[in-house]
Image: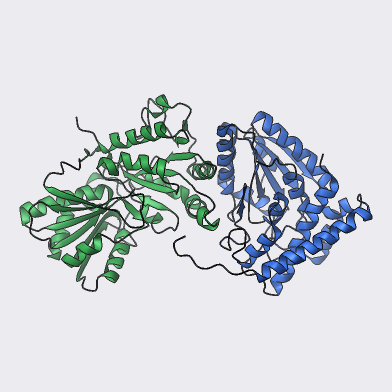
Chain colours: A green, B blue
Amino acid sequence: MSRTVLDSLNEGLLAALRQDEKVLLLGEDILDPYGGAFKATRGCSTAFPDRVIPTPISEAGLGGLCAGLALRGMGPVLEIMFGDFVTLLGDQLINHISKFRWMYNNTVTLPMVIRTPMGGRRGYGPTHSQTLEKLYLGVPGLTVVAPIAFEESAGNLLRRLICESDQPVLFIENKLQYLLPLHSAADSGELIQEKFYAASDPQQLYPTYRFTLKGAPSASVTMTAYGYMAELARQAQLKLAYEQEIFTELITPTRLSPFELQPLIDSALRTGKLLTIEEGTLTMGWGAEVGARAAEAIPGLNCLRRLAAQDTPVPASAELEKTALPQVDDIIDSVRKMV
Amino acid sequence: MIKEISLYTTMYRIRRFEETVLDEFKRGVFSGTTHTYLGQEADAAGVIGSLQAEDIVVTNHRCHGHFLAYGGDMRALFAELMGKATGVCGGRGGSQHLHWRNFYSNGVQGGIVPIATGMALAEKRKGGQTVTVVFIGDGTLGQGVLYESLNMASLWSAPLLIVVENNHIAQTTPTALTLAGSMAERFQAFGLTVNELDTSDVLQIQPVAWRMLAEIRASSRPQALILNTERFGPHSKSDDTRSEEMIEQLKASRDPLKFSEARISKAELEPIRTQVDEEVGAAFAQALTDPFPAWEAQP
């Protein structure tokens, strides 16, 4: 059986615990045999009983507690059971965790990772299905990361962030992404995968990927998507090519904030057309910022579209939810309108 | 036992620093805001004076007194309030956001308490004898995250001392208008040992703080110390709605300096006061001439 993103993240956590004895896992219901609501921590408490700490339902307090642990040299990793609950962390993330290093004039570090699964498509309804990371994009001092289904950008990225980053990271997983099989770099099927690192990332922690179709003519549209939406965009990319002979490039960052435009700009310069794709709601979203930056950087950008969730709560009804959230067919329709 | 003259010196340094800040604010030397500690000096002197070198202090917007009692440099604090490069945090933090050695402050109510709890637990894991002290005010009792922190601190036995400085007023609102129930029972409900004092006499505060810190070091259990006190100055610069008569009454009955001055000989007092006055004057003058920091977009 092939390994999934969830397997990779779970192994990343175990590897971090093995690698550095300062690493602590905290969260609700993370102990074995349950191993967390989505099983990301399974096996961790059995292997490291003293360093896996079940917590009360106190997200705000836990954010602060982890900041205190990190300021004094530990490496806390906090699981927030549902991404919807990151709202409870607001004061800690914005007024404390993200501020300390800068406002204390670079005299402290905060090596901490907060992981949480976002996303719908499971019928959990308005308060357990949201994609809320946009609330924390653009907060100075906070790094927001979204894994994708490559080992180096899932479990190994998580392990490296825990063990190698000395800055606070919000790590945005996705409930359906957990079940995806890991792609291997060597066997990426019909897609060519190229990898880029930003100049502002000297540790080369955060790859950005460009996916193009093998042997295809030059692309007519640039798509950009992250996390689970990047998987749906890959599916759309193949269907567009084989069923409609429309060729695209897909740019997938793993670091959402702070945000670098390359290699997106090079691609959009070639195609002149940019589609942003996200599962969060449309208004004031990730795509708005990416689109605005691209428009500023590319005078000739003649076509810009955003695909996102409807500006409503996420419905519980499976049929309504399909309409509210962007699907593969919606990506295809959006691209077709651009060519 | 700490000598009273040493505690007095701490209190007098805080008093003179804060008076200078309020005076000079009117002349436009400082920008932004400030929250002075006038009247509460015995709390900082008594509690922080009882700490060991490796102990941690986490505090709030009203933090100048705590910083000076901790041993922080007066010129660096003046400079920070002026936004100078030589400030405690290079001018980035200002009055409410200080960090030096094991001293940390932040300007948002409540959020520092879980941070202090995490620090206490980190030090406990390292195996030392470090105690973390967090200072909050009566107004902070309105913050929910405080109670999350009390639960976790007790559950995981954090070596933490929570000091509530109850000055009976939050900005301009008397605490009685915003607080239900008992302060002490809030902490007792989570299994913390609580001591409560109603005094501005440092010789009554210091031994209690000393004993509690020793108990926390021995037991690794959190405790709470409620210090009923009085604030002589405005919440920040000029937002005091209390009558002058009331303030004069408070100064007459609750001035920590007067309690100590009544017990210390003039011969001992005068040189200390002269020395501190000179120190404050020199620190202020030096900070005034210090340069402003350069902007760094990518620090």
Q: Nearer the viewer, residue A11 or A170?
A: A11
Question: In the shown orientation, is residue A200 left or right of residue B240?
Answer: left
Residue at image location 80% in from the left, 56% down from the top:
B12
Q: Residue A245 sits in which quadrant?
A: bottom left
Quadrant assignment for the N terminus of chain A:
top left
Residue B241 seen from this side: no
Question: In the shown orientation, is residue B85 left or right of residue A191?
Answer: right
Residue at image location 20% in from the left, 64% down from the top:
A268
Question: In the shown orientation, is residue A12 left or right of residue A4?
Answer: right
Q: Position of residue A125 (x, y in %)?
A: 32, 45
Q: Position of residue A277 (x, y in %)?
A: 24, 56
Quadrant assignment for the C terminus of chain A:
bottom left
A283 shown above or below B260? below
Q: Nearer the viewer, residue B210 or A215?
A: A215
Q: Residue A117 sits in which quadrant?
A: top left
Q: Position of residue A40 (x, y in %)?
A: 34, 34
Q: Nearer the viewer, residue B144 or A182?
A: A182
Q: Residue A174 sits in which quadrant?
A: top left
Question: In the shown orientation, is residue B153 left or right of residue A197?
Answer: right
Q: Nearer the viewer, residue A195 or B172?
A: A195
Q: Position of residue B122 (x, y in %)?
A: 55, 37
